[in-house]
Image (tube, rainbow, N blue to C red):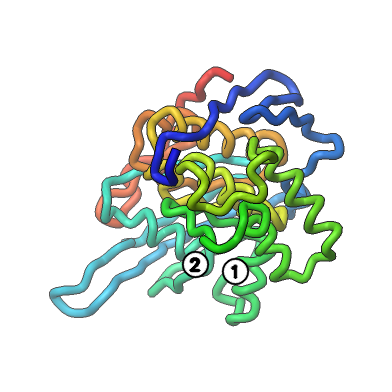
Amino acid sequence: MGPGGRGGSRAALSGGAGLRILGASLTYGGRFTVGDGDGRDGHPMVRVEGLRRSYGSGPAAVHALRGVSFEVARGELVAVKGRSGSGKTTLLNLVGGLDAPDGGRITVDGTDLADLGEEGLLELRRDRVGFVFQTFALVPILTAAENVGVPMRLRRAAPAEREERVRLLLSMVGLAEHAEQRPAELSGGQQQRVAIARALANRPALLLADEPTGQLDAETGRAMMELLRAVVRGEGVTALVATHDAALLDLADRVLELHDGVIVESAPAVTAAG
């Protein structure tokens, strides 16, 4: 189907250390590695304290975040829900170092983002944080394999290491046979799987996903969330996922609700059987 279509296979989780994701059988703890798993024990992966962000000034100012505080534990999958305009994207951009707050403090993997200059923020985004966007953000002239390999090129990984990692990740998301296809030749579900594989390329400690199922049908969207959950469960990668899709919230460990820039609820989610 076309890039906006309803492509993408289901992801089925099995018990124990082994699991089958989108047709690719993985055994975590063996030779297949997604995350580096060497986080700084004793610290949450994400700590946000009194975060404020506004756009504009005076009576016309838009207050996107108004004193938001929360923590995300290592290995946790936290969903952020709220209607459009509630501040979800702003929050993820700030946690990922893509934007700077007007006030408050953000600590990621033990590092206060306020202590980082532009070079430090670039290194954070390249080496320790992976991003998944609603619009996929794939480079149209590159193949699936080349798109997944871009982050490793940026950190100058050896070609052999890069090629092996790309093969592993595309196999993990069930796209080994589509490695040479360009985005326009892939369905929406397939493009998002490429985007997830790309986000994991440099073995990030934190995965940020902004409405990752927003352009997918319900079945494919749930498969994407199950894939994200499997990565979190298998390798201790931490994930913060913005979504307004109520049907997907039960796959999270915890749900934060944003309303007009304020967290109004933080509650454990009901975990789907897997």
Secondary structure of the residue carrying numbered label 2: strand
Residue 53 is left or right of residue 228, and the answer is left
Amino acid type of the residue tagged 2 in the rendering: Arg
Determine which quarter of the picture holds residue 118: bottom right
- Image: 120 above or below 268: below
**Image location of residue 103, percent across then percent down:** 40, 72
Looking at the picture, how far across and down is residue 145, in whole percent?
A: 67, 53
Asked if residue 97 can be seen in this view, the reply is: yes
Identify the residue position indicated by label 2 in the image. 105
Crowding near the residue tagged with mark 1, few <14, some 14–19, many ≥20 C-alpha atoms within 10 Å: some
Amino acid beneath label 1: Asp
Q: x%, y% of residue 243?
A: 39, 43
Task: Work out whether residue 142 or residue 114 is closer to the camera in this orientation and state it.
Answer: 142
Q: Residue 143 versus residue 129: which sits nearer the camera? A: 143
Which mark, by number, is residue 51? none
The residue at 62%/23% (across/down) is: 13
Q: Residues within 10 Å of mark 2 (few under 14, many from 20)?
A: many
Quadrant assignment, res 80: top left
Q: Residue at x 60, y 77 (%)?
A: 115
Q: Quadrant of the N terminus?
A: top left
270 over 186 or under it: above or below: above
Whether pointer 1 and pointer 2 mark residues with C-beta atoms closer than 8 Å, the reply is yes
Check the picture and name the quadrant holding the C terminus: top right
Residue extending farthest to the left is 59
Q: Estimate the spatial distance between the alpha carbons at disc 1 and disc 2, rounded to whole Å.
A: 7 Å
Is residue 114 found left or right of 232 in the rendered image?
A: left
The answer to whether residue 70 is visible is: no
Which residue bears the numbered disc 1?
112
Q: Nearer the viewer, residue 223 or 254?
A: 223
Q: Residue at 44% x, 68% y: name it.
A: 104
Residue 51: x and y in percent read 41, 64
Q: Secondary structure at mark 1?
A: strand
